[in-house]
Amino acid sequence: MIGIRNIFRLAADQAVAASVVLTDVTGLAANLASGQRAKFRFYVPCAVAGAASGIALEVITTVAPAQWNAAYKIINGSTSAFGKVSVQTAQAAVSNALANIANHLAEIEGEVTGGATASVLKLQFAQLVSDAAAATILRGATLEVVYES
């Protein structure tokens, strides 16, 4: 795919504590025109402060897309093992009970075609289990989008 490349970077840590409600990650979002095709990649370093917690992630569009596929990889930073691998043809949350206090990494890649009207492609994040100790998306997380020209 040759097209216009955009990179968005999280400027400050974004924490979620005591909540399993998916919340938009500020700044990791890109506009998507009706019928527009785009390839996307999220690089998401995160920290889990509560041993009982884990993370939940979802990449969504604000309008139902005409076409969607995505692959999620969550790597446990304590064990260096894949905590979760998921391939999707429809939008849905992916979660993993990382079960240890450490820094972890999620990588999400996919392709989307915009739906009937303009939309926004964005990342949402929450704790898997509500815990007073925060789960945090770390500064420097990125979204790279390449729009087909």
Image (cartoon, rainbow, N blue to C red):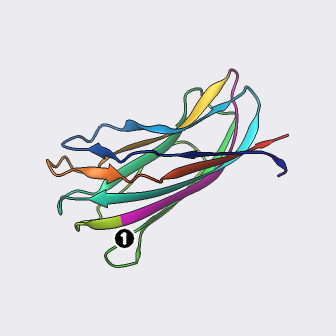
Q: In which quarter of the image is residue 48?
A: bottom left
- Classify residue 108 as left or right of residue 148: left
The residue nearer to you, when weighing 102 against 86, is: 102
Residue 116 is covered by the magenta coloring: yes
Percent x, y of residue 146? 73, 46
Residue 144 is covered by the magenta coloring: no
Secondary structure mostly seen in the magenta stretch = strand
- The answer to whether residue 93 of the structure is visible from this angle is no
How many neighbours does mark 1 have within 10 angstroms: few (below 14), some (14-19), or many (20 or more)?
many
Percent x, y of residue 126? 32, 45
Percent x, y of residue 53? 22, 56
Query: Please, what is the three-letter code of the amino acid marked with disc 1?
Result: Asn
- The answer to whether residue 13 of the structure is visible from this angle is yes
Q: Quadrant of residue 71?
A: bottom right
| Residue appearing at x 49%, y 37% in the figure | 27
| Residue appearing at x 85%, y 50% in the figure | 2
Tell me the magenta residue range: 104-117
- Classify residue 56 as left or right of residue 36: left
